[in-house]
Amino acid sequence: MGARGGRPGRNQQDQTLAGVGEFGLIAVLSAWLPPGPRTLVGIGDDAAVLAVPDGRVVASTDFLLEGRHFRRDWAGPADVGHKAAARSLADVAAMGAEPSALLVALAAPPDLPVSWARELAEGLAAECARAGASVIGGDTARADQVVLAVTSLGDLAGRAPVLRSGAAPGDLVAVAGPLGHAAAGLALLTAGITQNPLVAEHLRPAPPYDAGPEAAGLGATAMIDVSDGLLADLGHVAEASGVLIGLDSAALHPGDRLLAAARAVAGSRRHGDRTGLVTRPPDAQALRWVMSGGEDHSLVAAFPAGTRLPPRWKVVGIVAEGYGVVVDGQPWPEARGWDHFTASG
């Protein structure tokens, strides 16, 4: 990104990207993205320079595509910024690292208001601050729709990285953070129900970033963030570790908020769908959100048996000899989560 300037005035913010140009946009964005304590050289040069106390860098990258990951008629620009940062920073935390920085590439239509880009930057900065990170650079380009490519960096602080491949028979499987909330929020939005707190959890997921380093310190043998669905993501752990993961549906029973959301969505469909669509029972729908919903970006990890876990880690299953993921000893009969290249829509 180009040189940092003062915060733009209201008249500039009311313009479009075409009106301010590429370097005007960079000035707007950089003015709202303060450097973090690890940033030695930030926005304004060809590349940033970041202090790396550990000597190793954990890195991950992620896309956020308009029409696929968000809709501008549902999500405000600050929501998009929060979500873009959370999706990538959660990957770093899932390795047991402390998030430290983001690189953000933004492509957008020329008629996009500058004020939208400014609020996007505010959302990015706010979520970074929650994680202990900062935006240190990026790039801009023109596109027909808004596209963000986000690269996150993290510091292991002397710990070994927690991989997907270390789970062993006898380990406990535990989750930190909500499951199914983001999926329920999306279903509510799709049904035209916007006044529900779960909608906000879809628009602005809040990963428990510090739970990643915490799990590493507790001796976690494997970890992943729940982005595509609990079953799908644990499937990656099971495959990488060569084990069977058995989940307990009773431990994953949906809470009252999810059950109420499922009833609201079912009621909306009964009254609004002239095709006579038959919906699944609310308790079954809510459990489906928990098992395969994804996008909460909570953390799920395996720990050696007997590990004393802090209260926020909820044990939901065990690791055993075998292969794959089962629920109450049986294969899950429905889709396990999201796959970008096989899912429809």
Image: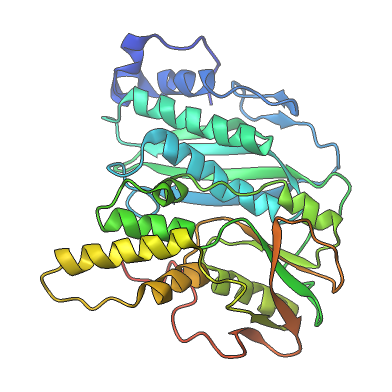
Query: Image check: 130 left or right of 39?
Result: left
Q: Residue at x 87, y 52 (%)?
A: 159
Residue drawn at x 57%, y 91% is: 330
Residue 124, compared with residue 180, is above or below; it is above
Q: Work out whether residue 242 can be spotted.
A: no
* Residue 154 shows in this picture: yes
Look at 60% across and 49% down and name the residue there: 207
Seen from the viewer's position, the closer of residues 342 and 298 is 298
Percent coordinates x, y for residue 268 in the rendering: 23, 62
The x, y position of residue 337, in whole percent, is 48, 71
Q: Is residue 107 left or right of residue 220?
A: left
Q: Of all residues shown, which one is farthest toward the left?
A: 274
- Above or below residue 269? Residue 329 is below
Quadrant in which the C terminus appears: bottom left
* Colour mapping used in the image: rainbow
**Please, is residue 148 above or below residue 214 in the view?**
above
Residue 82 percent location from the top left of the image: 50, 39
> What residue is at 85 percent from the left and 37 percent from the top?
53
